[in-house]
Image: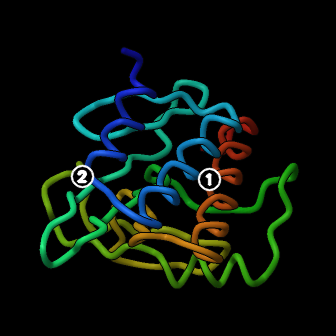
């Protein structure tokens, strides 16, 4: 079984309702822009051999009947515009509002990072710049745009 098939089957087993559809939509989007899927304890995606995103899946249960999914995106880089992917002010603001604070979980080599997100310096961030909780609708579309920007930054040599 391929890693992509395993990821999709795990999503279908752990999630329900709109969360299943949205997570599968996100996975399909990532692969459509050239990201490769691998399973490294979590669904993980790389672009041009660079780590880009992992998806944490929390299984459905009594308190969360649809389960939960959390894409964690962007390696430890500053987020800038790409010449090949223009970014409007609303996406910049969305990115700043969704920057993930470091909780010192032990997963980073250097906790509490200082990063620039579209020119705004931010302290105390996780090595995964963004963490989206059950993205749907506009949040899902913005997460996709940020992933497409990351692919362009990698392609440009800026990540």
Q: Quadrant of the C terminus?
A: top right
Write the residue at 36% across / 46% down.
Answer: 12
Earlier-in-chain disc, 2 versus 1: 2
Indicate the position of residue 69 as horizontal and vertical percent values. 35, 61
Q: Alpha-carbon neighbours of circle 1 within 10 Å: few (<14), some, or many (≥20)? A: many
Q: Is residue 145 left or right of residue 88?
A: left
The image quadrant that residue 40 belongs to is top left
Indicate the position of residue 54 as horizontal and vertical percent values. 39, 46
Q: Is residue 91 left or right of residue 107?
A: right
In the rendered view, would you say 138 is above or below 33? below
Q: Is residue 93 left or right of residue 65?
A: right
The image quadrant that residue 28 belongs to is top right
Q: Which residue is mark 1?
A: 147
Q: Is residue 112 left or right of residue 86?
A: left
SS of the residue under disc 1 = helix
In the rendered view, would you say 100 is above or below 21? below
Colouring rule applied to residues: rainbow
Q: Are dots 2 and 1 in contact, CB under 8 Å?
A: no
Write the residue at 70% across / 54% down.
Answer: 149
Viewer-nearest residue: 32 or 130: 32
Residue furthest to the top:
1
In the rendered view, would you say 104 is above or below 2? below
Whole-Å distance between the Cαs marked 2 and 1?
A: 20 Å
- In this rendering, which labeled residue sits more in front, label 2 or label 1? 1
The image quadrant that residue 137 belongs to is bottom right
Viewer-nearest residue: 123 or 15: 15
Indicate the position of residue 115 as horizontal and vertical percent values. 48, 68
Q: Which residue is mark 2?
A: 108
Write the residue at 67% across / 43% down.
Answer: 151
Write the residue at 74% across / 84% down.
Answer: 90
Indicate the position of residue 128 as horizontal and vertical percent values. 39, 58
SS of the residue under disc 2 = loop
């Amino acid at each position: 079984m391929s890693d992509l098939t395993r990821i999709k089957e795990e999503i279908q087993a752990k999630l329900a309702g709109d969360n299943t559809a949205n997570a599968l939509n996100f996975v399909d989007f990532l692969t459509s822009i050239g990201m490769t899927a691998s399973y490294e304890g979590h669904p993980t995606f790389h672009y041009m051999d660079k780590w880009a995103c992992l998806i944490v899946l929390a299984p459905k249960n009594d308190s969360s009947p649809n389960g939960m999914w959390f894409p964690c995106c962007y390696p430890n880089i500053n987020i800038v515009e790409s010449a090949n992917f223009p970014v409007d002010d609303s996406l910049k603001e969305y990115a700043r509002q969704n920057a993930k604070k470091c909780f010192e979980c032990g997963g980073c080599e250097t906790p509490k990072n200082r990063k620039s997100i579209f020119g705004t310096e931010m302290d105390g961030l996780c090595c995964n710049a963004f963490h989206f909780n059950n993205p749907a609708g506009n949040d899902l579309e913005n997460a996709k745009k940020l992933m497409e920007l990351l692919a362009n930054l990698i392609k440009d040599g800026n990540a």
